[in-house]
Amino acid sequence: MVSNHSNLIPRDYGRYIEPFLGSGAVFFHLLPNKALLGDTNEPLIITYNALKHNWKLVHRYLRRHQTLHSKDYYYQVRASSPRSMATKAAKFIYLNRTCFNGLYRVNLEGKFNVPIGTRQSVIRADDQFSDISTALESADLYPADFENLINLATANDLIFADPPYTVTHNNNSFIKYNEKLFSWSDQLRLFHALKRAQKRGAKVISTNACHPKIMELYQKDFRIIEVCRNSLISSKNEQRKLSQEIVILTR
């Protein structure tokens, strides 16, 4: 989105709002003066807040994880319940970097359950925790439902919404395959929240699947542009390919 379609992002806006933060690629590219960031993944938001307030402490705990890393240690950490924000963040990063295929998956009890992977590196040469901390100084971060954050948008705010969905089945049972990932009722909630925000004068950029149901939902109230981007859903390189998606923009 950022590298290939940066021309779609307005240069002039007030507060930046991103309700599906994830990796925060767009936020860290734009580096807005003021931001409201959120995600339903509470450990992710805790991690960002920990890096924001004391990245050096998080890094210290990560060095310990690097020193002790082994199969037994991985499962010991996975089962642990750290109390401080920094130790929770270090656990989140450690597991993400050493688990199978970098997946994030929890069981019905909300506990991370991905097995250990083959990667051994916990500390990386390209870690930019200091830069991340500096960038987040301008941001307020909350573990929250996307609708709650979008409802806070006012005139001239910029909303970037990139909801979770798979495009693998765009033309084959789209709703069925996405129901657990991002349900159709969630899609409707997102549409109405963005529509209300647009009426309040907020600027909207949202990505979604290039599917007739989605197109029909947005076409009367927003501009729609079809784009392509790499699909990284498959664990097999040969099955990773360009997928057709849409960018939804304020009229």
Image (tube, rainbow, N blue to C red):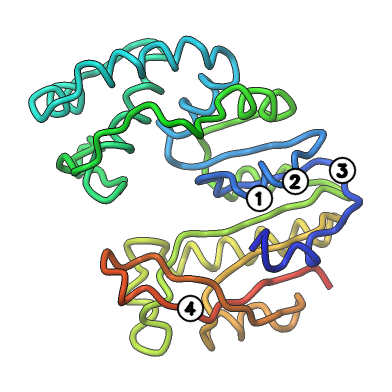
Q: Are marks 2 and 4 in contact (CB under 8 Å)?
A: no
**For residue 103, side relative to residue 71 (left or right):** right
Residue farthest right in this picture: 12
Q: Position of residue 131 (x, y in %)?
A: 64, 27
Circle nearer the viewer, 3 or 1: 1
Which is more foreground, mark 3 or mark 4?
A: 4
Name the residue carrying label 1.
26
Among the 4 quarters of the image, the one containing residue 199: bottom right
Image coordinates of residue 107 in percent, x first then y, are 20, 44
Q: Earlier in the sequence, mark 2 or mark 4?
A: 2
Q: Which residue is mark 3?
A: 14
Give residue 112's position: percent from left, percent from top: 24, 37
Q: Is residue 169 above or below residue 4?
A: below
Disc ID at residue 30: 2
Q: Tell me where residue 2 sits by quadrant.
A: bottom right
Query: Dots 3 and 4: beta carbons under 8 Å?
Result: no
Tell me whether the residue at label 1 lies in contact with that at label 4, contact meaning CB atoms closer than 8 angstroms: no
Above or below residue 29? Residue 186 is below
Please report contact status of discs 1 and 2: CB closer than 8 Å, yes or no: yes
Could you say whether the residue bearing mark 3 is in a helix, strand or loop? loop
Left or right side of 113 for 50: right
Q: Residues within 10 Å of mark 4 (few under 14, many from 20)?
A: few
